[in-house]
Image (cartoon, rainbow, N blue to C red):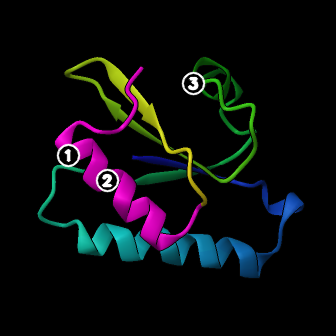
Amino acid sequence: MISFLPNIYDSSAQERNQYLDIIMTVAKKSRSQPFVFFWLQAGDQLDLERNLNLGFGFPAVVGISPTKKVIAVMKAAFDGKAYAEFLGDLLVGKAGLN
């Protein structure tokens, strides 16, 4: 799971910390699941963002399965409930895969 967070210059430290809290909370609740969580700042990996078609804004969440060679982009709001639902959808195969 890769979370692309807004550039720190486009938000505030408080907003960044809120996003990180959401990621940490979801990651802790998902310890028994086969997920690894990363985050990065939007604009730091432009080639990756372009390849994933993340032109719709940030924050954004992308699930990548290198072994299955599929990706899924979360299309909901960036909050703990939506993030957790997205993980559940990935586990049961309901998330839109590319």
What residue is rendered at 29% in x and 47% in y?
89
Q: Is residue 62 left or right of residue 11?
A: left
- Which disc, if any, is residue 22? none
Label 3 element class: loop
Count of marks overlaid on the render: 3
Q: Local crowd at mark 1 within 10 Å, few (<14), some, or many (≥20)?
A: few
Residue that numbered label 3 is attached to: 52
Q: Nearer the viewer, residue 92 or 33?
A: 92
Q: Let me know if residue 57 appears in the view.
A: yes
Query: Please, what is the dominant secondary structure of the magenta stretch?
Result: helix
Q: Which span is picked out in magenta?
A: 78-98
User: In the displayed image of the protein, which residue is found farthest to the left?
Assistant: 32
Please tell me the numbered disc located at residue 87.
2
Q: Of helix, strand and loop, which one carries label 1?
A: helix
Q: What is the three-letter code of the residue carrying label 3? A: Leu
Asked if marks 1 and 2 touch (Cβ < 8 Å), the reply is: yes
Classify mark 2: residues with Cα within 10 Å, few (<14), some (14-19) or many (20+): many
Q: Quadrant of the C terminus?
A: top left
Q: Which residue is mark 1?
A: 91
Q: For the residue marked with disc 2, what is the amino acid?
A: Leu
Q: Choose between 86 and 62: the one closer to the eye.
A: 86
**Separation (CA) of disc 1 from disc 2:** 6 Å
Horizontal side, residue 10 vs residue 47: left or right: right
- 36, above or below 67, in the image: below
Picture coordinates of residue 33 (x, y %)? 15, 57
Q: Residue at x 36, y 63 (%)?
A: 84
